[in-house]
C-alpha cells in the first residue's frame, strides 16, 4: 500500500518522443555518408536497396496476414520504408530530395507512433484506475479489520479489569472483621466462594 514514488528523469520521458526523429535522422546521415562514398547514381546500389525494401514490405504483408501481429507487420513496413528512404537518399545528388523524404518519413513515423502512444496511455490510465480502486477496497477492508481487532482488544481489557476488580473486592471483603459467609447463606444470599473453597 505504501509504494515508493519514483520520479522519472526527463530524459527517460523525452527519449520515446524523440525516437522517430532520431531514427529518420540517423538513416538520412548514413545514406548521405553512403552517397559520398560512391552510392550516388549507382544503379547496383539502388537496385540492392529496392530489393531489400520490397523484401521487407513482403515480410510485413506476410506477417500481417499469417499472424495478425500488428507490431511485427508495422516493424517490417518501417524497415521497408527506411530502406527505400536510404536508397533514394544515397542515390540522389544534392540534399533537397533527401530532406523532403526525411521530413515525410519523420511525419509518418510520428503519426504511427502517436497511435501507439495513445494506446499505451489508455492502458496506463486504466491500470492506474484499477490499481487505485483495488487500493481503496483493500484500505476499507483493512480499516474494518483494524476496528474489529481494536474492539476485541478493548472488550478483553474491560473483562480483565472487571475480573481484577472483582477479585480485589472479594479479597478485601474476606479480610473485613466480623465477616461471616455462613450468615449470608442463612439470609438467603447465594454462597460466595471462600479462599479455602477456591484452593480446593
Image (cartoon, helix red, strand yellow):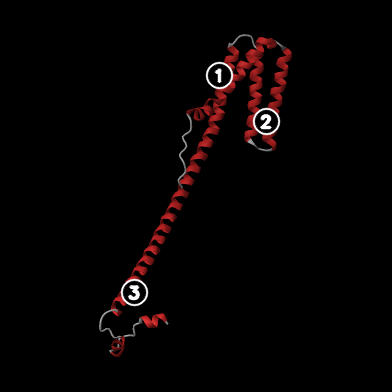
Depth check, mark 1 against mark 3: the one in front is 3
Q: Residue at x 56, y 22 (%)?
A: 22
Determine which residue is flagged by label 1: 103
N-terminal-most mark, 1 or 3:
1
Tell me the element at label 1.
Answer: helix
Disc 3/disc 2 C-alpha distance (Å): 88 Å
Q: In the displayed structure, does residue 174 sit left or right of residue 34?
A: left
Determine which residue is flagged by label 2: 60
- Find residue 51 and report its horizontal and vertical position in percent: 72, 21
Estimate how packed mark 3 is, as few (under 14), some (14 to 19) or many (20 or more) residues with alpha carbons within 10 Å: few
Tell me the element at label 2.
Answer: helix
Q: Nearer the viewer, residue 187 or 129?
A: 187
- The answer to whether residue 40 is visible is no
Q: Nearer the viewer, residue 179 or 98?
A: 179
Q: Residue 62 is drawn in which quadrant?
A: top right
Q: Which mark is residue 167?
A: 3
Q: Is residue 163 above or below residue 75?
A: below
- Find residue 129 and report its horizontal and vertical position in percent: 47, 44
Disc 1/disc 2 C-alpha distance (Å): 23 Å
N-terminal-most mark, 3 or 2:
2
Q: Nearer the viewer, residue 23 or 173?
A: 173
Depth check, mark 3 against mark 2: the one in front is 3
Amino acid at each position: 500500500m505504501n509504494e515508493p514514488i519514483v520520479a522519472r528523469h526527463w530524459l527517460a520521458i523525452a527519449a520515446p518522443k524523440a525516437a522517430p526523429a532520431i531514427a529518420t535522422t540517423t538513416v538520412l546521415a548514413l545514406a548521405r555518408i553512403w552517397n559520398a562514398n560512391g552510392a550516388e547514381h549507382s544503379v547496383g546500389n539502388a537496385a540492392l536497396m529496392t530489393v531489400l525494401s520490397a523484401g521487407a514490405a513482403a515480410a510485413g504483408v506476410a506477417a500481417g496476414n499469417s499472424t495478425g501481429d500488428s507490431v511485427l507487420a508495422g516493424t517490417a513496413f518501417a524497415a521497408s520504408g527506411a530502406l527505400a528512404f536510404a536508397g533514394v537518399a544515397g542515390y540522389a545528388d544534392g540534399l533537397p530530395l533527401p530532406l523532403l523524404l526525411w521530413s515525410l518519413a519523420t511525419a509518418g513515423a510520428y503519426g504511427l507512433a502517436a497511435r501507439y502512444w495513445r494506446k499505451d496511455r489508455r492502458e496506463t490510465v486504466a491500470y492506474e484506475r484499477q490499481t487505485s480502486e483495488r487500493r481503496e477496497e483493500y484500505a476499507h477492508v483493512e480499516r474494518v479489520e483494524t476496528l474489529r481487532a481494536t474492539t476485541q482488544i478493548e472488550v478483553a481489557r474491560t473483562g480483565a479489569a472487571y475480573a481484577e476488580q472483582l477479585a480485589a473486592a472479594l479479597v478485601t471483603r474476606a479480610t473485613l472483621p466480623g465477616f461471616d459467609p455462613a450468615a449470608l447463606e442463612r439470609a438467603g444470599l447465594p454462597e460466595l466462594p471462600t479462599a479455602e473453597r477456591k484452593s480446593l
